[in-house]
Image: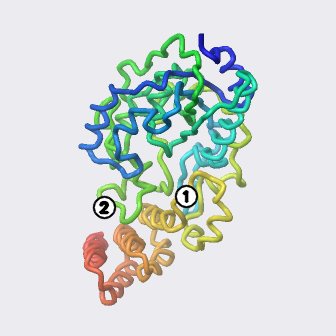
Amino acid sequence: MPEVSYETLNRTAKQAGFDAVGATSADPFPELVPRLQAYEKRGRTGFEYADIDARVNPKAWFPPAKSLISVAMAYLTAEGRQLARKHPRQGFHGQVTVYSYGQDYHNVMAERMRELVCLLEQEVGRHIESKVAIDTAPLVDRRVAERAGLGWVGKNCMFYTPQHGSFVFLGTLAVDVDVETAKSEVIQRCGSCTLCLDACPTGALVAPGVIDATRCLSYITQMKGVIPRDYRAAMGKRVWGCDTCQWACPENRNVLDALHEEYMPSLPPGELEFPDLVEVLQWTNKSFAKRYGHTAAAWRGVRIWQRNALIALGNTRTEEAVRFVTPFLTHDRKELRISAAWALGKIGGGAALDALKNAINAETDALVLEEIRNALEEAESE
């Protein structure tokens, strides 16, 4: 008999504030090995663990593990859903993924998972050895959740629960307790639909259930360094993340709203969801941290946002943006100078051309010079 029944797990998980819970053994996931090897060949993003054994063997990560508890929290609130549909028509505004509207889910989930452990300790009458995984551990949370019976992995590689669709955060809790495992498996409901693949702006979804993560805009907006030229136009006004495949999915159209206060939009409407791009360019590290440090969109720092904001301003193709972009041609960060040059090439016009011509005489970096020359050619052809 397991030490913790599913009924007990379900009850305590609800007390801790989770929307779905399940458990599976801490046995390895050998079926993942060929998938992860194929993923390696397509190109890792650098956000994942390189050690495949650690990713498929929970006990390599946490030796005492007997069971893996998978938990889910929904994050798409009614308010968040409404805000996401109201992109301002006036002014220079970027776009931020819905999962960042509220508090940083890593902190929220970790606190609730610790609470769940405390509740389970009261049930079993002993201390429980445990370890928390939320995005930052080797384990593949989606596959743990799938085996634990919470839902399925869609063709867009997102995890779905029956009630909240793919708008959920997942966490894995490894424990030294035998927990009753899932009684049934939730069947994938994608059918013949390929709307998510069709909607992907960069073709990152190369096949159903197969993603080239290096082409995914959610990754690209968070990567360090220079944004590859092929993806800049596709970014549109995105400054952090991408929800396109989720909004395209029919399974997400009638999902239940999240009710967690932590994931309610935490700033005045529009400030985070559609940030003022000109204001982004004026931020310091301190002002950025003060405004957005509590969200999951802040971990890369202000320079990543400014790089993306420059590209977004280029995608507006509005000459009024030239005066805000031009100062970044002399920034000490190379990726910002490159982004500014590209943006001015897209905008075009006399002021953009003058700024690029002045910059080419002062620039010494070969990569930046190449970008400026390309931008001049594009601006002159407009």
Q: Position of residue 109 (x, y in %)?
A: 64, 40
Q: Residues within 10 Å of mark 2 (few under 14, many from 20)?
A: few
**Residue 181 shown left or right of residue 372 in the figure:** right
- Dot 2 falls on a residue whose secondary structure is helix
Q: Using the image, tell me which numbered label, if any, was put on residue 229.
A: 2
Nearest the eye: 20 or 55:
55
Name the image quarter holding the C terminus. Answer: bottom left
Q: Dot 1, crowdedness within 10 Å: few (<14), some or many (≥20)?
A: some
Residue at 66% of width from left, 55% of height from top?
294
Residue located 30% across and 61% down the image: 229
Q: Tell which of 335 and 360 is nearer to you.
A: 335
Residue at the image position 24 percent from the left and 43 percent from the top: 41
Q: Is residue 380 visible?
A: no
Q: Amino acid at mark 2?
A: Arg
Q: Is residue 195 visible?
A: yes
Q: Find residue 285 and report its horizontal and vertical position in percent.
A: 59, 71
Q: Quadrant of the N terminus?
A: top right
Q: Position of residue 219 (x, y in %)?
A: 42, 50
Depth check, front residue: 326 or 256: 256
Label disc, if present, on residue 76 of the rendered structure: none
The disc placed on residue 299 is 1
